[in-house]
Image (cartoon, grey):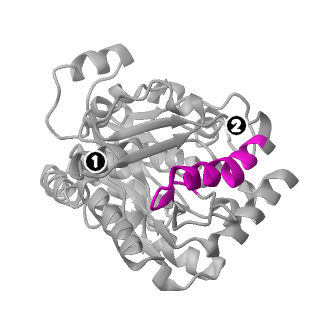
Protein backbone atom coordinates (compact mmCIF):
# COMPACT_ATOMS: atom_id res chain seq x y z
CA UNK A 1 0.00 0.00 0.00
CA UNK A 2 2.89 2.37 0.75
CA UNK A 3 4.23 2.04 -2.80
CA UNK A 4 0.80 2.55 -4.34
CA UNK A 5 -0.02 5.60 -2.22
CA UNK A 6 3.34 7.28 -2.81
CA UNK A 7 3.02 6.72 -6.58
CA UNK A 8 -0.55 8.02 -6.63
CA UNK A 9 0.45 11.13 -4.69
CA UNK A 10 3.41 11.79 -6.97
CA UNK A 11 1.48 11.26 -10.22
CA UNK A 12 -1.66 13.12 -9.13
CA UNK A 13 -0.62 15.97 -6.83
CA UNK A 14 -3.90 17.78 -7.47
CA UNK A 15 -5.82 15.11 -5.55
CA UNK A 16 -6.13 15.05 -1.77
CA UNK A 17 -5.34 11.61 -0.40
CA UNK A 18 -6.32 10.48 3.10
CA UNK A 19 -4.87 7.35 4.71
CA UNK A 20 -7.22 5.99 7.37
CA UNK A 21 -5.49 3.34 9.49
CA UNK A 22 -5.00 2.18 13.08
CA UNK A 23 -2.40 4.32 14.89
CA UNK A 24 0.30 1.63 14.76
CA UNK A 25 0.12 1.67 10.96
CA UNK A 26 0.23 5.44 10.71
CA UNK A 27 3.08 5.88 13.18
CA UNK A 28 6.42 6.36 11.44
CA UNK A 29 4.96 6.91 7.97
CA UNK A 30 7.10 9.13 5.77
CA UNK A 31 5.31 12.39 4.96
CA UNK A 32 4.03 12.60 1.39
CA UNK A 33 2.86 15.79 -0.37
CA UNK A 34 -0.93 15.86 -0.61
CA UNK A 35 -1.37 12.87 1.74
CA UNK A 36 -3.05 13.21 5.13
CA UNK A 37 -2.52 10.44 7.67
CA UNK A 38 -5.48 10.00 9.98
CA UNK A 39 -5.11 7.43 12.78
CA UNK A 40 -8.34 5.71 13.83
CA UNK A 41 -8.05 3.77 17.10
CA UNK A 42 -9.34 0.20 17.09
CA UNK A 43 -10.67 -1.77 20.07
CA UNK A 44 -8.32 -4.55 21.16
CA UNK A 45 -8.52 -8.13 19.94
CA UNK A 46 -10.01 -9.84 16.90
CA UNK A 47 -13.46 -8.36 17.46
CA UNK A 48 -11.87 -4.93 17.59
CA UNK A 49 -10.36 -5.55 14.16
CA UNK A 50 -13.76 -6.44 12.76
CA UNK A 51 -15.38 -3.40 14.39
CA UNK A 52 -12.70 -1.14 12.89
CA UNK A 53 -13.20 -2.55 9.39
CA UNK A 54 -17.00 -2.69 9.47
CA UNK A 55 -17.89 0.40 11.52
CA UNK A 56 -14.98 2.73 12.32
CA UNK A 57 -13.53 2.93 8.80
CA UNK A 58 -16.73 3.46 6.74
CA UNK A 59 -18.16 5.91 9.30
CA UNK A 60 -14.96 7.99 9.27
CA UNK A 61 -14.92 7.98 5.46
CA UNK A 62 -18.52 9.24 5.37
CA UNK A 63 -17.81 11.97 7.92
CA UNK A 64 -14.86 13.18 5.87
CA UNK A 65 -17.00 13.32 2.75
CA UNK A 66 -14.52 11.40 0.63
CA UNK A 67 -15.54 10.61 -2.94
CA UNK A 68 -14.33 7.03 -2.80
CA UNK A 69 -13.06 4.50 -0.26
CA UNK A 70 -10.35 2.01 -1.22
CA UNK A 71 -9.89 -0.96 1.12
CA UNK A 72 -6.52 -2.45 0.08
CA UNK A 73 -7.13 -5.98 1.35
CA UNK A 74 -10.01 -8.44 1.55
CA UNK A 75 -12.11 -6.71 4.22
CA UNK A 76 -15.00 -4.88 2.55
CA UNK A 77 -17.61 -3.29 4.81
CA UNK A 78 -21.09 -4.74 4.62
CA UNK A 79 -22.54 -1.23 4.63
CA UNK A 80 -20.28 1.47 3.17
CA UNK A 81 -22.81 4.02 1.84
CA UNK A 82 -20.20 5.41 -0.53
CA UNK A 83 -18.38 4.06 -3.59
CA UNK A 84 -15.95 1.39 -2.41
CA UNK A 85 -13.04 -0.32 -4.15
CA UNK A 86 -11.65 -3.47 -2.54
CA UNK A 87 -8.38 -5.19 -3.41
CA UNK A 88 -8.61 -8.98 -3.09
CA UNK A 89 -5.07 -10.29 -3.44
CA UNK A 90 -6.09 -13.94 -3.25
CA UNK A 91 -8.69 -16.34 -1.83
CA UNK A 92 -6.25 -18.48 0.15
CA UNK A 93 -8.42 -18.69 3.33
CA UNK A 94 -11.34 -19.82 1.20
CA UNK A 95 -9.68 -22.21 -1.23
CA UNK A 96 -6.91 -23.92 0.76
CA UNK A 97 -8.11 -26.08 3.70
CA UNK A 98 -4.84 -25.65 5.62
CA UNK A 99 -5.43 -21.89 5.78
CA UNK A 100 -9.05 -21.82 6.91
CA UNK A 101 -8.19 -21.63 10.60
CA UNK A 102 -10.56 -22.16 13.51
CA UNK A 103 -14.19 -21.07 13.92
CA UNK A 104 -13.33 -17.39 14.40
CA UNK A 105 -11.27 -17.23 11.21
CA UNK A 106 -13.95 -19.07 9.24
CA UNK A 107 -16.61 -16.71 10.55
CA UNK A 108 -14.49 -13.74 9.48
CA UNK A 109 -14.01 -15.25 6.02
CA UNK A 110 -17.77 -15.77 5.74
CA UNK A 111 -18.34 -12.11 6.67
CA UNK A 112 -15.98 -10.66 4.07
CA UNK A 113 -17.22 -13.15 1.50
CA UNK A 114 -20.79 -11.93 2.03
CA UNK A 115 -19.71 -8.29 1.87
CA UNK A 116 -17.58 -8.60 -1.29
CA UNK A 117 -20.41 -8.43 -3.88
CA UNK A 118 -21.50 -5.10 -2.37
CA UNK A 119 -18.26 -3.38 -3.35
CA UNK A 120 -18.41 -1.07 -6.34
CA UNK A 121 -15.32 -2.62 -7.91
CA UNK A 122 -12.86 -5.36 -7.01
CA UNK A 123 -9.17 -5.12 -7.87
CA UNK A 124 -6.85 -8.09 -7.90
CA UNK A 125 -3.24 -8.78 -8.81
CA UNK A 126 -3.46 -11.47 -11.50
CA UNK A 127 -5.71 -13.16 -14.04
CA UNK A 128 -5.51 -16.36 -11.98
CA UNK A 129 -6.79 -14.57 -8.87
CA UNK A 130 -9.52 -12.89 -10.92
CA UNK A 131 -10.72 -16.28 -12.17
CA UNK A 132 -10.89 -17.52 -8.57
CA UNK A 133 -12.86 -14.45 -7.48
CA UNK A 134 -15.37 -14.70 -10.32
CA UNK A 135 -15.86 -18.41 -9.77
CA UNK A 136 -15.97 -18.65 -6.00
CA UNK A 137 -17.38 -15.26 -4.95
CA UNK A 138 -19.98 -15.19 -7.73
CA UNK A 139 -19.02 -11.69 -8.81
CA UNK A 140 -19.72 -10.56 -12.37
CA UNK A 141 -16.48 -10.59 -14.42
CA UNK A 142 -16.90 -6.94 -15.35
CA UNK A 143 -16.66 -5.94 -11.69
CA UNK A 144 -13.24 -7.52 -11.15
CA UNK A 145 -10.21 -5.74 -12.63
CA UNK A 146 -6.65 -7.07 -12.81
CA UNK A 147 -3.95 -4.57 -11.81
CA UNK A 148 -0.57 -6.26 -11.23
CA UNK A 149 1.80 -5.29 -8.46
CA UNK A 150 5.44 -4.30 -9.02
CA UNK A 151 8.86 -4.62 -7.46
CA UNK A 152 10.47 -1.75 -5.60
CA UNK A 153 13.00 0.27 -7.60
CA UNK A 154 15.71 -1.03 -5.25
CA UNK A 155 15.49 -4.34 -7.12
CA UNK A 156 17.70 -3.69 -10.13
CA UNK A 157 20.46 -5.61 -11.92
CA UNK A 158 23.35 -3.23 -11.22
CA UNK A 159 25.16 -4.29 -8.07
CA UNK A 160 25.16 -1.72 -5.33
CA UNK A 161 28.30 -0.71 -3.47
CA UNK A 162 26.89 -2.48 -0.43
CA UNK A 163 26.35 -5.86 -2.12
CA UNK A 164 29.72 -7.27 -1.15
CA UNK A 165 29.29 -6.21 2.46
CA UNK A 166 25.82 -7.75 2.65
CA UNK A 167 26.98 -11.10 1.28
CA UNK A 168 30.08 -11.05 3.45
CA UNK A 169 27.98 -10.45 6.55
CA UNK A 170 25.79 -13.39 5.59
CA UNK A 171 28.81 -15.58 4.88
CA UNK A 172 27.93 -16.02 1.21
CA UNK A 173 29.77 -16.10 -2.09
CA UNK A 174 27.86 -15.31 -5.32
CA UNK A 175 26.60 -18.12 -7.53
CA UNK A 176 24.12 -19.90 -5.25
CA UNK A 177 20.57 -21.11 -5.80
CA UNK A 178 18.22 -18.92 -3.77
CA UNK A 179 14.87 -19.56 -2.17
CA UNK A 180 13.04 -16.71 -0.43
CA UNK A 181 9.31 -16.57 0.16
CA UNK A 182 8.07 -18.09 3.41
CA UNK A 183 7.79 -21.58 4.82
CA UNK A 184 4.10 -22.45 4.97
CA UNK A 185 2.91 -25.57 3.17
CA UNK A 186 1.79 -24.02 -0.09
CA UNK A 187 5.34 -22.75 -0.65
CA UNK A 188 6.38 -26.36 -1.28
CA UNK A 189 9.81 -26.34 0.39
CA UNK A 190 10.01 -30.12 0.18
CA UNK A 191 10.40 -29.77 -3.60
CA UNK A 192 13.16 -27.17 -3.09
CA UNK A 193 15.33 -29.63 -1.19
CA UNK A 194 14.47 -32.60 -3.37
CA UNK A 195 15.41 -30.69 -6.52
CA UNK A 196 18.60 -29.41 -4.92
CA UNK A 197 19.52 -32.96 -3.86
CA UNK A 198 19.44 -33.99 -7.53
CA UNK A 199 21.53 -31.00 -8.55
CA UNK A 200 24.08 -31.90 -5.91
CA UNK A 201 24.28 -35.46 -7.20
CA UNK A 202 25.68 -34.03 -10.44
CA UNK A 203 27.66 -31.00 -9.28
CA UNK A 204 28.71 -32.07 -5.79
CA UNK A 205 29.98 -29.37 -3.46
CA UNK A 206 29.91 -26.79 -6.26
CA UNK A 207 26.13 -26.62 -5.81
CA UNK A 208 25.04 -24.32 -3.01
CA UNK A 209 21.55 -23.51 -1.75
CA UNK A 210 20.58 -20.43 0.25
CA UNK A 211 17.24 -20.45 2.08
CA UNK A 212 16.36 -16.97 3.30
CA UNK A 213 13.88 -15.88 5.93
CA UNK A 214 13.08 -16.32 9.59
CA UNK A 215 12.69 -20.05 10.27
CA UNK A 216 9.51 -21.42 11.89
CA UNK A 217 9.64 -21.52 15.68
CA UNK A 218 7.99 -24.95 15.70
CA UNK A 219 7.93 -27.81 13.22
CA UNK A 220 4.25 -27.97 12.26
CA UNK A 221 2.27 -29.50 9.41
CA UNK A 222 1.22 -26.00 8.41
CA UNK A 223 4.82 -24.66 8.43
CA UNK A 224 7.30 -27.57 8.31
CA UNK A 225 10.77 -26.85 9.60
CA UNK A 226 12.94 -26.60 6.45
CA UNK A 227 15.88 -28.09 8.34
CA UNK A 228 13.91 -31.32 8.71
CA UNK A 229 12.95 -31.21 5.03
CA UNK A 230 16.62 -30.78 4.14
CA UNK A 231 17.55 -33.83 6.21
CA UNK A 232 14.74 -35.93 4.71
CA UNK A 233 15.92 -35.03 1.21
CA UNK A 234 19.39 -36.35 2.05
CA UNK A 235 21.08 -32.95 1.66
CA UNK A 236 24.08 -32.39 4.00
CA UNK A 237 23.76 -29.50 6.43
CA UNK A 238 26.94 -27.97 5.02
CA UNK A 239 25.34 -27.61 1.56
CA UNK A 240 22.52 -25.30 2.68
CA UNK A 241 22.87 -21.85 4.21
CA UNK A 242 19.89 -20.70 6.27
CA UNK A 243 20.19 -16.93 6.54
CA UNK A 244 17.47 -16.28 9.09
CA UNK A 245 15.63 -12.95 8.96
CA UNK A 246 16.66 -10.70 6.05
CA UNK A 247 16.10 -6.96 6.34
CA UNK A 248 14.36 -5.35 3.37
CA UNK A 249 17.38 -3.27 2.49
CA UNK A 250 19.56 -6.41 2.24
CA UNK A 251 17.24 -8.36 -0.09
CA UNK A 252 18.35 -6.79 -3.41
CA UNK A 253 21.97 -7.78 -2.76
CA UNK A 254 20.86 -11.28 -1.79
CA UNK A 255 18.97 -11.67 -5.06
CA UNK A 256 21.83 -10.24 -7.13
CA UNK A 257 24.25 -12.76 -5.64
CA UNK A 258 22.12 -15.68 -6.84
CA UNK A 259 22.67 -17.66 -10.03
CA UNK A 260 19.04 -18.84 -10.05
CA UNK A 261 15.91 -18.32 -7.99
CA UNK A 262 13.80 -21.38 -7.10
CA UNK A 263 10.09 -20.90 -6.40
CA UNK A 264 7.90 -24.05 -6.59
CA UNK A 265 4.85 -22.51 -4.86
CA UNK A 266 1.52 -24.28 -5.28
CA UNK A 267 -0.65 -21.15 -5.00
CA UNK A 268 0.02 -17.43 -5.36
CA UNK A 269 -2.28 -14.48 -5.83
CA UNK A 270 0.64 -12.74 -7.50
CA UNK A 271 4.14 -13.85 -6.46
CA UNK A 272 6.32 -10.85 -5.65
CA UNK A 273 9.59 -12.72 -4.88
CA UNK A 274 9.94 -14.09 -8.44
CA UNK A 275 9.37 -10.59 -9.82
CA UNK A 276 12.00 -9.16 -7.47
CA UNK A 277 14.44 -11.82 -8.67
CA UNK A 278 13.71 -11.02 -12.33
CA UNK A 279 14.18 -7.30 -11.68
CA UNK A 280 17.66 -8.12 -10.38
CA UNK A 281 18.40 -10.12 -13.54
CA UNK A 282 18.12 -13.52 -11.88
CA UNK A 283 16.41 -16.30 -13.89
CA UNK A 284 13.56 -18.10 -12.13
CA UNK A 285 12.82 -21.80 -11.90
CA UNK A 286 9.23 -21.82 -10.71
CA UNK A 287 5.93 -23.64 -10.68
CA UNK A 288 3.39 -23.41 -13.47
CA UNK A 289 0.61 -22.96 -10.89
CA UNK A 290 -1.89 -20.11 -10.48
CA UNK A 291 -0.33 -16.67 -11.08
CA UNK A 292 3.37 -17.59 -11.24
CA UNK A 293 3.41 -17.94 -15.06
CA UNK A 294 1.92 -14.45 -15.40
CA UNK A 295 4.78 -12.99 -13.38
CA UNK A 296 7.64 -15.04 -14.82
CA UNK A 297 6.57 -15.22 -18.46
CA UNK A 298 9.37 -16.60 -20.64
CA UNK A 299 12.06 -15.33 -18.27
CA UNK A 300 12.41 -18.64 -16.47
CA UNK A 301 11.64 -22.32 -16.56
CA UNK A 302 8.23 -23.37 -15.22
CA UNK A 303 7.34 -26.90 -14.18
CA UNK A 304 4.53 -28.61 -12.31
CA UNK A 305 4.96 -28.03 -8.55
CA UNK A 306 5.85 -31.70 -8.02
CA UNK A 307 8.13 -32.07 -11.07
CA UNK A 308 11.33 -32.29 -9.04
CA UNK A 309 13.28 -33.75 -11.96
CA UNK A 310 12.23 -30.87 -14.21
CA UNK A 311 13.28 -28.29 -11.61
CA UNK A 312 16.62 -30.00 -11.09
CA UNK A 313 17.27 -30.13 -14.83
CA UNK A 314 16.53 -26.43 -15.23
CA UNK A 315 18.76 -25.53 -12.30
CA UNK A 316 21.62 -27.65 -13.64
CA UNK A 317 21.41 -25.94 -17.00
CA UNK A 318 21.36 -22.47 -15.43
CA UNK A 319 24.38 -23.37 -13.32
CA UNK A 320 26.45 -24.81 -16.16
CA UNK A 321 25.27 -23.30 -19.47
CA UNK A 322 26.51 -19.72 -19.77
CA UNK A 323 24.61 -18.96 -22.97
CA UNK A 324 21.33 -20.25 -21.55
CA UNK A 325 21.83 -18.28 -18.35
CA UNK A 326 22.67 -15.11 -20.29
CA UNK A 327 19.56 -15.47 -22.43
CA UNK A 328 17.26 -15.97 -19.44
CA UNK A 329 18.92 -13.04 -17.66
CA UNK A 330 18.13 -10.87 -20.69
CA UNK A 331 14.54 -12.09 -20.69
CA UNK A 332 14.30 -11.55 -16.92
CA UNK A 333 15.10 -7.86 -17.21
CA UNK A 334 12.67 -7.46 -20.11
CA UNK A 335 9.89 -9.23 -18.23
CA UNK A 336 10.45 -7.25 -15.03
CA UNK A 337 10.26 -4.01 -17.02
CA UNK A 338 6.61 -4.81 -17.82
CA UNK A 339 5.73 -4.09 -14.17
CA UNK A 340 6.07 -0.74 -12.41
CA UNK A 341 4.41 1.06 -9.54
CA UNK A 342 3.72 3.97 -11.86
CA UNK A 343 1.69 1.70 -14.15
CA UNK A 344 -0.06 0.14 -11.15
CA UNK A 345 -0.92 3.58 -9.76
CA UNK A 346 -2.21 4.88 -13.09
CA UNK A 347 -4.41 1.83 -13.63
CA UNK A 348 -5.73 2.18 -10.09
CA UNK A 349 -6.42 5.88 -10.54
CA UNK A 350 -8.24 5.17 -13.81
CA UNK A 351 -10.54 2.83 -11.87
CA UNK A 352 -11.16 5.55 -9.28
CA UNK A 353 -11.92 8.11 -11.96
CA UNK A 354 -14.40 5.83 -13.76
CA UNK A 355 -16.30 5.17 -10.54
CA UNK A 356 -16.46 8.81 -9.48
CA UNK A 357 -17.42 9.98 -12.96
CA UNK A 358 -20.08 7.31 -13.20
CA UNK A 359 -21.67 8.40 -9.95
CA UNK A 360 -21.69 4.83 -8.56
User: Residue 107 versus residue 260: which sits nearer the camera?
Assistant: 107
Left-right relation of 290 to 345: right
The kind of secondary structure the magenta stretch mainly shows is helix
Q: Is residue 216 magenta?
A: no
Q: Give the CA separation, mark 1 to mark 2.
A: 27 Å
Q: Nearer the viewer, residue 156 or 137?
A: 137
Residue drawn 42% across the image and 29% down it: 29
Give the labeled residue for mark 1: 7
Percent x, y of residue 187: 56, 51
The answer to if 63 sits in the magenta stretch is yes
Residue at coordinates 76% horizontally, 63% vertically from top-left?
111
Q: Secondary structure at mark 2?
A: loop
Q: Nearer the viewer, mark 1 or mark 2?
A: 2
Numbered disc 1: secondary structure: helix
Q: Is residue 235 above or below residue 131?
A: above
Task: Tell which of 319 and 171 is nearer to you.
Answer: 171
Q: Which span of residues is magenta-colored?
A: 48-73
Residue drawn at x 65%, y 32% as measured from the top left: 216
- The reply to whether residue 183 is in sight is yes
- Spot occupied by residue 86 in the image (x, y as percentages of width and height): 53, 63
Picture quadrant of residue 163: top left
Amino acid sequence: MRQLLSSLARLHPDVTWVLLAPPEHVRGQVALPGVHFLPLPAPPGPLGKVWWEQVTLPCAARRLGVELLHVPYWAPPLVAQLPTVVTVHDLIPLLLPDYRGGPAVRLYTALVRAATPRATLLLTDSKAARADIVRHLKVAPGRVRVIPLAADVAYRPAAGVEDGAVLCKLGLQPGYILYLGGFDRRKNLRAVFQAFARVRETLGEAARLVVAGRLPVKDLDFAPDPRRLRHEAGVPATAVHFTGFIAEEAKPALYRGARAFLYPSRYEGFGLPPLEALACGVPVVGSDATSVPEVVGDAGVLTAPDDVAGMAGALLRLLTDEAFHAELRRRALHQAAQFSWEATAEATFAAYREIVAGGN
